[in-house]
Amino acid sequence: MGVDAWLQETVVLCVWPRRSLPLSDATFDIGGGPCASVASRVVTMEVEELHPPLAEVPPRRSLVYLYDDWADKVASFLKKGHVETESMASTASQATDFSCVVVASPTLLEAAGLFIHDDSSDNDDDDDAPRTIFLRYQEPIRAPNSDQVAYERLCTLRADTRPPPPSKKRRLRVGDEYQYTPLASLGERTADVYGVVVSYTTPKQSSRGRMDFEMTIAITDESRPERAQALYINVFARDLAHLPRILAVGDVVRFHKLLMSRYNGVLVALCTRASRFVVFRMADGSDTDVVMTHTYETVTYHPSDKARAIALLQWGAATLLNDHTQCPRNHFGPPRALRHCYPAAYVDVIAYVESPFRAGHPAVAVVSDRMHVTAEVHVHAHFAALDAMGWAAAAVGRWCRFRGVEVTATDSLVLHFRVSSSLEIYPTPATPPRPLPLDRIVTRVPREIAALGCVNLAVFLTRPVPCKAHVLAEIVDVSPRTAGAFTTRMNNRDVYMGLLRLQDATASVDAILFGADGELFFGRPARHGDDTEAADAQLTHLRTHRQPLQWCLVSYRTTTGDVRVRIVQTQLGS
C-alpha cells in the first residue's frame, strides 16, 4: 500500500509522546486515531510538506499515528530530539473529517478493519512475500549561541512483516459514505462540503505553470448564511470541460476532498487532483426533480444526496433574495443599476440581457434595466469561455451581474467586458430588487459634441480653463426650486438664471443655466414671474427622477479669477 509522494519529505510540526490507550479523556485532544480501540500505545505526529510544488499553494499537512511496537521504536529518538512536548496546540480537529497515516503491524491493522487482505489466485505468488516498513529521520540540533538549525546523520527504523493468514476470502471494500462538514466548522484539513453558489468568476487561463484554467466559486450554507461569510474555492482544470458546470447563482455544488488552508488569515479551499465536484439545480418547472451535472463517468449519489441538494436549493432561493451583504472579495463596490452608471474605471453593473450576443470582436449584446435605460455590452475578452460554459446563451432573458466592466459613453452607454471582468447569472424567476420606476428624461447635445467620448466630472474639472466637454451626469438638485424664481429681468427682458447641481460617480458641480441656453434647454422663452403648476412640476421632475443625462459643459474664468461651469447647447427632450 503506497503513500502520497509528498509524505516522503516532511518536517515535524508537533508530537504527542507515547501514551497508553484508551485515553482517559480525549475531548480536547487529537485522540487515539483509527486503531485506538485495538492498540495499547500510540505516538502521534503532525507533519508538514517540506517542499510545496507551488509557492502560492500552502504546504500540505497530515497526522501520523504510530501504534504499539512502532510507538516504542520512535519513543527513543523523540526523547533525544528537540520536538517532544507534553502539550502542544494543533490545527487538527476531531470535528473535521480528514485523512491520516497509520503505522502499525498488519495484525493490528486487520483487527482495526484497516488492512484488507486479498488471497485471490492472481496474488498467490505475493501473499507470503515479506513487506518492509521503514521510517527515515534526521534529528534537529541547534549550535550554542546561534539561531541556526542543523540536522544529524540520517537514521532509519525498519520492520519486516508478513500479512496475517486470511480467515476467509476477502475483497477490497469500497467506502462510499462521506461526512459532510458545515462551512462554519471547517478547519485546515481535507473536507467534504455542500454549498449554495453566491458568486463565481469567469474561467481564465493561467499564464504560468501548466497553463490550466482557473475559476473561483463562493458558497454559503445554513451555518454561514450571508454572502459576506462566503467560503472561496479555487478550482483548476486542464480545460474548460473539466470545470464545474455552474449555470447561475443559487446552484448547489458538492465537493469531495477539498483541501482547506489559510491565506492571509482567511480560510479558503483548493480543489486538487483528488477532489471531485457535482453541481445540482432544480429541473425547469419542478420543485422535486434535480438536474445533476458533473465531468466524471460515475459519481456517488444516494437518496440523502438528493434530499440535501433539494433542501439547499430551496434554502438558497429563500435566503439570497433577502441577503443584501456583499461577498468579501468585492473589489468594485456594490453593484449599480444602469441608471446610475457613468464613465468610470471599473464597476459592477446589474442589467437584463435583452438580446443574444452577436459574434465578432468584440461580441455585442443589448442590456437594459427593463424600464427605459438601454446599453450595449462589448465582450473584448473571454467570450470563448462564456460560450463554452453555456453562459452566453443562458444569460439571454435573465438578470446578470457584469463584474468589473468599464463604462464609457458617447451618445449611449457601453459596458466593456475586459480581461478582469466576470459574468454572474441570476436565477429565474428570482431577480435583483428592482429600483423605483422613473419617468424617462432625455437631453440632447449637438452631433459634433455627441461624437466625442464622455468624460467624468473629475477629469473635466481638472482640465485647463477654458474647456468644453461632453459629460454624462445626473441632476441632484435645482436652485431655485420654483419656476418663478428661476427667471429674472435683465436689460428689459426676461431671462433664465439658475443652477443645476450635476453629479456622477467621481464629482459634483453647480452648473449655471443662463439666457439663451436656458431657453434652448426648456424649449420655451423665459417669462418672469411664471409660477404655473406645469413649470414647477417640471423642475421637481428633473430633481426627483435622477438618471444619467448628456450635457455640454463649458468652464471659464471670471474677472476675479473664479472658475465657473456653464451649461450650453443642451436641450431637454421629451
Image (cartoon, grey):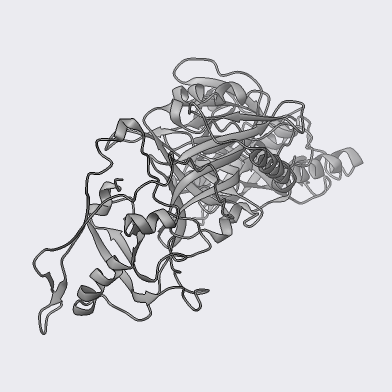
On screen, 422 above or below 228? above
Horizontal and vertical percent position of residue 110:
40, 53
The answer to whether any part of residue 380 appears in the image is no
Residue pictured at 40% horizontal, 41% vertical = 274
- Compared across the picture, whether 155 is left or right of 544 comes to left
- Pick whichever, 439 or 158, lies toward us: 158
Q: Is residue 110 left or right of residue 85?
A: right
Q: Position of residue 96 (x, y in %)?
A: 51, 59
Q: Is residue 37 above or below residue 199?
A: below
- Residue at 30% over, 60% down: 48
Query: Where is residue 83 shown, x and y percent of the image?
Result: 25, 75
Q: Residue at x 78, y 37 (%)?
A: 438
Q: Position of residue 9 (x, y in %)?
A: 22, 55
Find the residue positioned furthest to the right.
533
Locate the N terminus and report the quarter of the image it occupies: top left
> Relative to residue 464, is residue 519 drawn left or right?
right
